[in-house]
């Protein structure tokens, strides 16, 4: 017998489109945009009751807004999280997820293989507040164990890593953290929300730059922090409310529209990335191709265990050095040079001079980031056109 809608176990793609939507008295199809900073109360008593938390309702868009509420609901369904809060950018999500979990005298263990700005937060900003930070070789499980101190409160890492696509074993690192009362915070942006579920593998908090695949069309900045309601609603909420890194209602609306097509977009991007990685391996001008979905990846088995598909990014190395890499980049016509990723357009960057410019030469050497390393975020163009563009550009480095 067919079940009523509320009794069905809906798939995530259906939930993206239908769950969490709030409609006005006009009963619009597409969710309305609530571009308002404040809200009107019917009486002074109602205003007092809302501020006291005695009745539900919006107070100020720095605290909450209908568009943010809708997006948070959809993102929780996506991640399997109890609660979520949105921020004005992905880096705001990184900073506040860390800062709200530590105080002066506490210790964080962070991976060395992370985005350059994340590394700056760990190495340059947090120590100014009396927070101790130890950076470890990301894929070395023993290094995480050895770095633990009595005052260690947080493990922080991303997987796959930016830009070398190393895979960290989420469950193994989370198990170590759980044994020592440490919270695990994971930046899951490269895997995309539908292809890796860190909370199910033991993570406590998951963050995204919603600017990337969640928006998916390079339009708006945004970030999201997801986790248990006790932390999100009783602690993080006040940090964000009083310091103000609020996501705009319009950006939240754009992100909602992006979520509706996230599944079909990432399916195509991952399919394209797999084919592009295979093609790059046939080119004599390419010295190395790194793709988590292929068996020659050093952490292929871990990727297979915790990811669905190899992801929408491919990293590769052109034979030669910076000059050859730049010549290749400058010859591309369809693939655009940009440090962004997760777009419908294929985007490529030279990490050593852009996203990881501030990383020391010694640290780049450890990570394998060389002057001929390129990171390709695969888009939705026809695969034959992307491959033709790569072939055309590669001819200049022969």
Image (cartoon, helix red, strand yellow):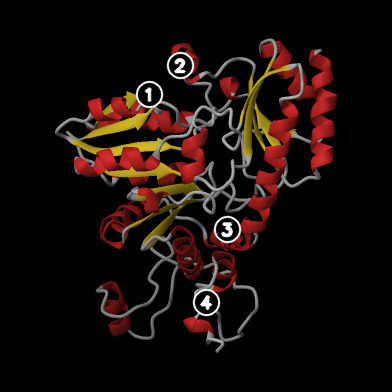
Q: Looking at the image, is mark 2 or mark 1 earlier in the sequence? A: 1
Q: Nearer the viewer, mark 4 or mark 2?
A: 2
Label 1: which secondary element = loop
- Disc 1 marks which residue? 137
Query: Contact (CB < 8 A) between labels 2 and 1?
Result: yes
Mark carried by residue 255: 3
Label 2: which secondary element = helix
Mark carried by residue 311: none
Seen in the picture, residue 22 relative to 256 is either above or below; the reply is below
Label 3: which secondary element = helix
Q: Which residue is drawn at 31% across and 37% down?
A: 155
- Disc 2 marks which residue? 366
Query: Contact (CB < 8 A) between labels 3 and 4?
Result: no
Visible residue check, residue 332: no
Visible residue check, residue 238: yes
Query: Contact (CB < 8 A) between labels 1 and 3?
Result: no
Quadrant location of the N terminus in the rendered image: bottom right
Label 4: which secondary element = loop
Q: From mark 2 to mark 1, how far is it between C-alphas?
A: 9 Å
Q: How crowded is mark 4: few (under 14 residues within 10 Å), some or many (20 or more)?
A: some
Q: Which of marks 1 and 3 is in front?
A: 1
- Disc 4 marks which residue? 22
Say left or right for 7 vs 380.
Answer: left
Quadrant location of the C terminus in the rendered image: top right
Q: How crowded is mark 2: few (under 14 residues within 10 Å), some or many (20 or more)?
A: few
**Residue 336 drawn at (x, y percent):** 74, 34
Q: Looking at the image, is mark 4 or mark 2 earlier in the sequence? A: 4
Closest to the observer: 280 or 54?
280
**Residue 377 drawn at (x, y percent):** 65, 37
């Amino acid at each position: 017998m067919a079940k009523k809608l509320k009794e069905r176990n809906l798939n995530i793609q259906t939930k993206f489109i239908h769950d969490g939507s709030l409609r006005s008295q006009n009963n619009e199809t597409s969710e309305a945009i609530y571009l308002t900073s404040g809200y009107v109360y019917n009486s002074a008593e109602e205003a007092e009751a809302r501020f006291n938390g005695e009745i539900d309702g919006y107070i100020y868009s720095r605290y909450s807004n209908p568009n943010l509420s809708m997006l948070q609901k959809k993102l929780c369904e996506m991640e399997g999280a109890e609660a979520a809060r949105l921020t004005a950018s992905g880096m705001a999500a990184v900073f506040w997820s860390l800062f709200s979990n530590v105080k002066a005298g506490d210790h964080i263990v962070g991976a060395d293989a992370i985005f350059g700005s994340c590394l700056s937060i760990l190495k340059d900003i947090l120590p100014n507040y009396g927070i101790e930070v130890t950076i470890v070789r990301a894929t070395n499980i023993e290094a995480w164990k050895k770095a633990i101190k009595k005052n260690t409160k947080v493990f922080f890492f991303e997987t796959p890593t930016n830009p070398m696509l190393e895979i960290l074993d989420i469950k193994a690192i989370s198990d170590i953290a759980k044994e020592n009362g440490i919270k695990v915070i994971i930046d899951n942006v490269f895997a995309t929300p539908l292809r890796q579920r860190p909370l199910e593998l033991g993570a406590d908090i998951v963050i995204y730059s919603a600017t990337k695949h969640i928006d998916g069309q390079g339009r708006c900045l945004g970030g999201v922090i997801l986790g248990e309601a006790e932390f999100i609603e009783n602690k993080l909420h006040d940090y964000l409310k009083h310091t103000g890194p609020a996501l705009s209602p319009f950006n939240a609306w754009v992100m909602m529209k992006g979520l509706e097509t996230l599944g079909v977009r990432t399916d195509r991007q991952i399919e394209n990335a797999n084919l592009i990685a295979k093609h790059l391996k046939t080119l004599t001008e390419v010295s190395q191709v790194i793709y988590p979905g292929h068996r020659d990846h050093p952490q292929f088995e871990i990727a297979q265990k915790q990811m669905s598909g190899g992801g929408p990014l491919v990293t590769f190395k052109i034979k030669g050095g910076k000059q050859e890499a730049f010549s290749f980049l400058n010859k591309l016509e369809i693939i655009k040079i940009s440090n962004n990723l997760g777009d419908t357009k294929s985007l490529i960057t030279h990490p050593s001079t852009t996203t990881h410019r501030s990383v020391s030469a010694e640290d780049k050497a450890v990570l394998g980031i060389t002057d001929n390393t390129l990171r390709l975020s695969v888009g939705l163009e026809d695969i034959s056109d992307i491959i033709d563009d790569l072939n055309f550009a590669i001819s200049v480095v022969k």
